[in-house]
Amino acid sequence: MIPKTRDRRRRGLWACAAMALCLMAPIASASQMPVAAQRIVVAAAASMLPSINQAIAEFHAEQALTAPPPVRVSAIYASSGALARQIISGGPALLFISADPRWMDAVERAERLIPGSRRELARNALVLAVPRKSKLSLDLKPGADLTRILAGGRLVTADPDHAPLGMHARAALKWLGAWAMIEDRLVRVADAAQARILLERGAVAAGVLYASDVALNPRLRSLGTFPAVSHPPSLYEIARIGNGLLEASTTAAATRFEDWLSGPRGQAILRAHGFAPPEGH
């Protein structure tokens, strides 16, 4: 039988050995620890869907080459009015891209914008578009007979009572002198993306769309661009959303993507998709 003192001594030696092994084990440094990505949501006007999707993909690719923490961006698309109402009601977006300054004004009045973060991102033009194979043609000037080229067909655009595209389309058609003639043949949809899809499918004869809807679109072509004097300017603004409770790291993540999108590569993507740069750039 082993004396108790010797047994206690042996247990103490085993404890010391175990502790020594623990101390010898490699400890991951802070630089080796995985860093959680900062995730942000962008609420963007529906007319920006293709361009913002490409921008997000390229931004993520660049994140793999930069120092942590990475920023991961997801986007929701709708009309600017619908998005503004969601944000005012406390929606999850940290960045808002509006196709009409009036909706950005509404969010600002609700004190949901981070002061000083609002800036112009891009501009757009308004076009009369038709399916690529369409034989239609029209000179966009006052007095043009739009009903003739429709030949019994219908015209699509976003709802003039809610979406910036529709509001601008109504103004441009009134300038053309065609609004009263085609109002009852107008197909009103929720936003620019839905208008584009309906025209791509050939469900309507023509549509008033943004130039960005047609620029890289193999299914559509433009009959002409409405003069700038025919409608309010199509200004796209971007701003950060906050309520004073966000962590500094979250706000910094939103700033990183906002700055990237406003920078050289982001602007190049927008130009490729038919957007014009902000005034003065």
Image (tube, rainbow, N blue to C red):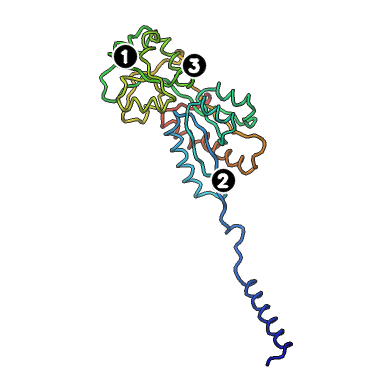
Q: Give the Cα distance between marks 1 and 3.
A: 22 Å
Give the mark nearest the N terminus, 3 or 2: 2
Q: Give the Cα distance between marks 3 and 2.
A: 37 Å
Q: What percent of the width, then of the height, locates residue 64?
A: 49, 49
Identified by mark 2, the residue type is Gln
What residue is rendered at 56% in x and 40% in y? 256
Residue 26's place in the image compared with 97, above or below, is: below
Closer to us: 2 or 79: 2
Check residue 38 in the rendering and tell me which mark sits there, or answer none.
2
Q: What percent of the width, then of the height, locates residue 197?
A: 36, 28
Residue 255's place in the image compared with 222, above or below, is: below
What residue is rendered at 61% in x and 65% in y? 27
Residue identified by numbered label 1 = 138
Residue identified by numbered label 3 = 232
Describe the element under mark 2 as helix, strand or loop: strand
Q: Do tag 1 and tag 3 residues touch (Cβ < 8 Å)?
A: no
Name the mark nearer the viewer: 2 or 1.
2
- Say few, some or many: other residues with alpha carbon within 10 Å of mark 3 (under 14 / 14 to 19 / 20 or more): some
Describe the element under mark 3 as helix, strand or loop: loop
Residue 236's place in the image compared with 264, above or below, is: above
- Say few, some or many: other residues with alpha carbon within 10 Å of mark 1 (under 14 / 14 to 19 / 20 or more): few
Identified by mark 3, the residue type is Pro
Left or right: residue 28 compared with residue 278 = right
**Can residue 281 be seen from the camera position used here?**
no
